[in-house]
Image: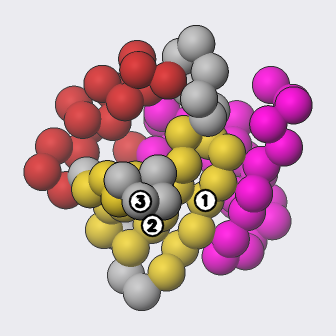
Amino acid sequence: MGHLSYFRVDKGYVDFRVRRDDEYWATVRQLIRKFGKDLKYKQATGLFSIPNTGRGMARLATIFPEEWQIVISLDTDEITFNEGEQ
């Protein structure tokens, strides 16, 4: 299971960065399967982007359950996760 290093809700989209650990590529494959053509990648920033919908949020919650609990509890638009914690 992958981990997020960054999460932001902005202008109808959700941007996030996946932590570059040993689960990175497995997580990217899972994101592609879950989101298909809705998943965008911004190479310059390393951010993935999806439309901000309830369905999209539910899919993210299943891929990143640990971080999702933090997102819900903090109720904020932008979070940088501590990469030292897993």
* Kind of residue at badge 2: Val
- The reply to whether the magenta stretch includes residue 64 is yes
Classify 29 as above or below 8. above
Q: Return the residue nearer the eye: 59 or 41.
A: 41
In what element is the residue under mark 1? strand
* Kind of residue at badge 3: Ala
Please name which of the two marks, 3 or 1, marks the residue nearer to the observer: 3
Q: Which residue is mark 1?
A: 7
- The reply to whether the magenta stretch includes residue 13 is no
In what element is the residue under mark 2? strand
Q: Position of residue 41 (x, y in %)?
A: 31, 53
Q: Position of residue 20 (x, y in %)?
A: 59, 29
Q: Residue 54: in sight, yes or no?
A: no
What is the basis of the colouring in this image?
Answer: secondary structure
Please name which of the two marks, 2 or 3, marks the residue nearer to the observer: 3
Rendered image quadrant of residue 42: bottom left
Would residue 29 be found to the left or right of residue 47 on screen? left
Q: Position of residue 84 (x, y in %)?
A: 87, 31
Which part of the image, by quadrant, shows the N terminus? top right
Q: Earlier in the sequence, mark 3 or mark 1?
A: 1
Q: Earlier in the sequence, mark 1 or mark 2?
A: 1
The label number, if any, that marks residue 44 in the structure image: 3
Classify 64 as above or below 1. below
Residue range of the region highlighted in magenta in the rendering:
60-86
The label number, if any, that marks residue 14 in the structure image: 2
In what element is the residue under mark 3? loop
Classify 80 as above or below 27. below
Residue at image coords 30%, 68%: 51
Alpha carbons under labels 3 and 1: distance apart: 16 Å
Would residue 74 be found to the left or right of residue 33 on screen? right
Q: Are marks 1 and 2 in contact (CB under 8 Å)?
A: yes
Q: Residue 46: in sight, yes or no?
A: yes
